[in-house]
Amino acid sequence: MLKIENISKRLGKEQILKDVSFEVSPGEVFGFLGPNGAGKTTTIRIITGLLEQDAGKVTVNGFDVVEERSKALTQIGAIVENPAFYPYLTGKQNLVHAKNLIPGLGQVDYDALARLVGLEGKLSKKVGEYSLGMKQRLGIARALLHNPRVLILDEPTNGLDPSGIAELREYLRQMAREQDIAILISSHMLSEMEQISDRYAIIDQGVIKSVESVRNETGAKIALRVNAEAMTEVLDALRVANYPSEVLENKIIITAPESECPAIARLVVPIADLHELTVKRLTLEEQFLQVTKKEGDSHAFAHTK
Amino acid sequence: MLSLIQNEWMKWWTTKKAKIVLALYVVIAVGIIIVAKTNDFEFTRYDYYSSTFLLLTSLLGIITIVFTAEAIGNEVRYDTMKHLLMSPYSRMTIYFSKLIFSILIMLFQFVFIAAIVYAGSFVFSEAGDPILFRDTIVEVVSPIFTIFMTLFFSLLFRSVGMIIGFTVLAQFFTSIAGNLLVGFKPAIAKWIVFMHLDWSMYFKDSMTYGTSEAMGTTLTFSALFVLAHIIVLLGASILVFQRKSYT
């Protein structure tokens, strides 16, 4: 659906993006994470045709954003940086303006769109009178106006209150699922992305550090409590089977994907009495730290609003 | 393209200043009638038409700069340019929609001014000299050139104030320099484009007749000279707009 292949971009003397690649599938909510200045917005600007990459390729539904610009951009709905509107026009006039920017787009049910984003009865107000949260909602309505196959949202929860964020989260997940839309959301808010995304990519200094599933393919903390006499034997068996483990408060802690639980249980049961097996999922923040620890970098991420 | 022009119309017509400007033309046209009548000026229809039309088209020149500057300047001001550039339309189409709309809006005001002044002239009973279509139509050259020049400056500066300022200053000072040069160095003055925007200088019954003779130019020369400048401004604008990054 959305495929980014080895894109690089230099602005002046600075290499902003280096060989960035990832894919977003239909029905998937993909988090694009990174500290401020990591290259998120530049990547989004390239995807939306605002900037042209020096190398690499971006395709949307098979259409190259550079070679088949018009066809590719017709498939995309986006909010880049902040939702910008004409303040002297009403919400509806701004949506009509956006509709006129899509060649060949038929009738649009503006009231249904307003209901969808929680702006019912507010479209007749001038946008200059809107709060930031209302502008974000109107931005999403504008991005969805032409039923895009790919939705790109750059920091979409800026200015939304907690209930607005929760609503948006539910709405985006439902839309991805029911309408099979590929959604790319960029953010530097790890906790927020954890709740919205299926998968995520971490970008830092223009380089993709990791593409992972939020559902712990990287690793969970699996804790085992076995009889004390068998502890050494279990640790040896785990080491031989290549499961990194350590002992903490009389428990063996293994860092491994959650899906490895049955295999670990099968390994332990013949040699020890297994009293307890618990799984603690890694938070996105822990996964992020794990990824960046490998790289030996330090980062400044926001964890909460 | 038509839908982009519709968008431009919506943005222009929704603002109060569009209606204020039209009202201002009417107020000035009516005001001159009132002043003429109350002071017993011996105005013929021709006198009223030619003087009022000249005054209002001079005002139109300034207003055209403002509206044209805002066509691109406001997109930068409200950060909506990126939204236009993210649309499936090419940058070239977006630029031409702005250009065509600016010309259409100027022509709309031009016709509006001509209509109200012509209608107002019937308040005066004496006809005087005949009102010539020719004298009216030549006044459209200057605002058309202004549009191309303002759009070019719109791509160089981000603020609407700077765009207006530069366009007005360029026009004002170069015109003054040209008019001064006509007196003692007409051979140099003829290479200043602003000296070729008033084509009435080629009509013997015009007040400006003599300027063209001094410069030794013909109507064809002026037309080609202005056209060449328009082509250069258009080419430069397209080149800048294609490459410009609105971040």
Image: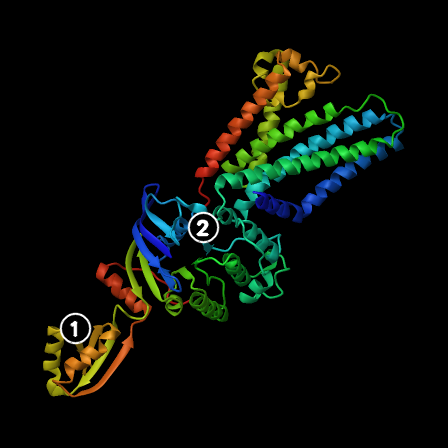
Q: In the figure, residue A108 lies in which quadrant?
A: bottom right
- Are the residues flagged by discs 2 and 1 in contact, CB closer than 8 Å? no
- Where residue A18 appears, as percent x and y from the top left, is 29, 49
Q: Secondary structure at mark 2?
A: helix
B166 vs B218: above or below: below
Q: State the quadrant of the C terminus of chain A.
A: bottom left
- Residue located 34% across and 48% down the image: A57
| Pointer 2 local density, CA inside 10 Å: few below 14, some 14–19, many at least 20 | many
Q: Which of the 4 image quarters holds residue A277?
A: bottom left
Query: Which image quarter is the N terminus of chain A in?
Result: bottom left
Q: Is residue A110 above or below residue A72?
A: below
Q: Above or below — where is A48 with respect to B69?
A: below
B93 relative position to B61: left or right = left
Residue at 55% of width from left, 27% of height from top?
B230
Please indicate, yes or no, whether residue B161 appears anywhere in the rendered image: no
**Kind of residue sitting beneath label 1:** Tyr
Mark 1 lies on residue:
A243
Q: Earlier in the sequence, mark 2 or mark 1?
A: 2
The residue nearer to you, when weighing A198 against A64, is A64
Q: Position of residue B221 (x, y in %)?
A: 59, 17
At horizontal 56% and vertical 50% (from top left) the residue drawn is A100
Kind of residue at badge 2: Leu
Q: Looking at the picture, how far across and down is residue A220, in whole percent?
A: 26, 73
Label 2 marks a residue whose chain is: A
> Local crowd at mark 1 within 10 Å, few (<14), some, or many (≥20)?
some
Q: Which residue is mark 2?
A: A73
Which of pointers 2 and 1 indicates the residue nearer the eye? 2
